[in-house]
Image: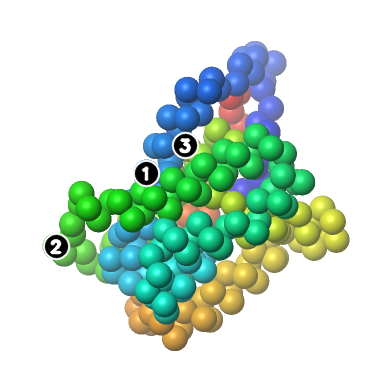
Amino acid sequence: MASLDNIKPTAEQPHRGHTLVEDALAIIIGTLMVSFGVVMLRQVGALTGGTAGMAFLAHYISHVSFGTAFFIINLPFYYLSIRRMGWQFTLKTFTAVALVSVFSDLHPLFVHFDHLQPFYATLFANVIMGIGFIVLFRHKASLGGVNILALFLQDKYGIRAGKLQMGVDCCIVLASLFVVSVEMLIASILGAVIVNLIIAMNHRPGRYSV
């Protein structure tokens, strides 16, 4: 996942930061987009990587709601987030995780899909989620989980964050062989690539002034 380091202002355009209202609206918009993508993935039986992937596996295996599983799985990571990222980032991340958990269970009360082509829906859901991630990252928030653990272990023990995250995602993919179809597994892998490409292209430290 792309770096969450502060984006440095350029000399021509001084950094003004975001207001509290702007941060709040951005977190709501970003989590609405991510959670809507989650609903599409859940509808077709696909999944994704990271903590969300763990939550999908828990949902498919135990039938616990995705929102509940996602919220619970993220709980242990907040201590590391406080140590690595500070209180402000952690509070924003906790709020974002809570909203995704709630919204992903609320969307089906208002939206019902009569038909979704599974492969297309998986890829498009990841596009929506990628855009939602960018909104959150631009306002110094995230959806916590494995990314925070990876950054913490990199700082503490020199373990490369990217390698650890890739290892976790590989474990999720292997575990998913028992709960999703091969077609959905291939689509899920391609979807994860799309999310990471969107993040890599649009979230680079120093690119934006705010």
Label 2: few (<14), some (14–19) or many (≥20) C-alpha neighbours in 10 Å: few
In this rendering, position of residue 60 left or right of residue 74? left
Disc 2 from disc 1: Cα separation: 21 Å
Q: Provide the secondary structure element on which disc 3 rests.
A: helix
Q: Is residue 186 above or below residue 131?
A: below
Which amino acid lies under the numbered mark 1 shown in the image of this protein?
Leu
- Residue ID for mark 3: 27
- Residue ID for mark 2: 114
Q: Is residue 144 above or below residue 26?
A: below
Q: Work out whether mark 2 precedes mark 1 in sequence or the reverse, and give the earlier one.
A: 1
Disc 3 from disc 2: Cα separation: 29 Å
Q: Visible in this render: residue 139?
A: yes
Q: Position of residue 168 (x, y in %)?
A: 62, 70
Q: Visible in this render: residue 203?
A: no
Frontmost residue, 146 versus 186: 146
The numbered disc on residue 115 is: none
Q: Is residue 12 above or below residue 150?
A: above
Q: Residue at x 52, y 42 (%)?
A: 95
Q: Quadrant of residue 44?
A: bottom left
Which amino acid lies under the numbered mark 2 shown in the image of this protein?
Asp
Name the image colouring: rainbow
Q: Provide the secondary structure element on which disc 1 rests.
A: helix
Q: Position of residue 138 (x, y in %)?
A: 55, 34
- Residue ID for mark 1: 32
CB under 8 Å between callouts 3 and 1?
A: no
Label 1: few (<14), some (14–19) or many (≥20) C-alpha neighbours in 10 Å: many
Q: Position of residue 5 (x, y in %)?
A: 69, 39
Q: Work out whether mark 3 precedes mark 2 in sequence or the reverse, and give the earlier one.
A: 3
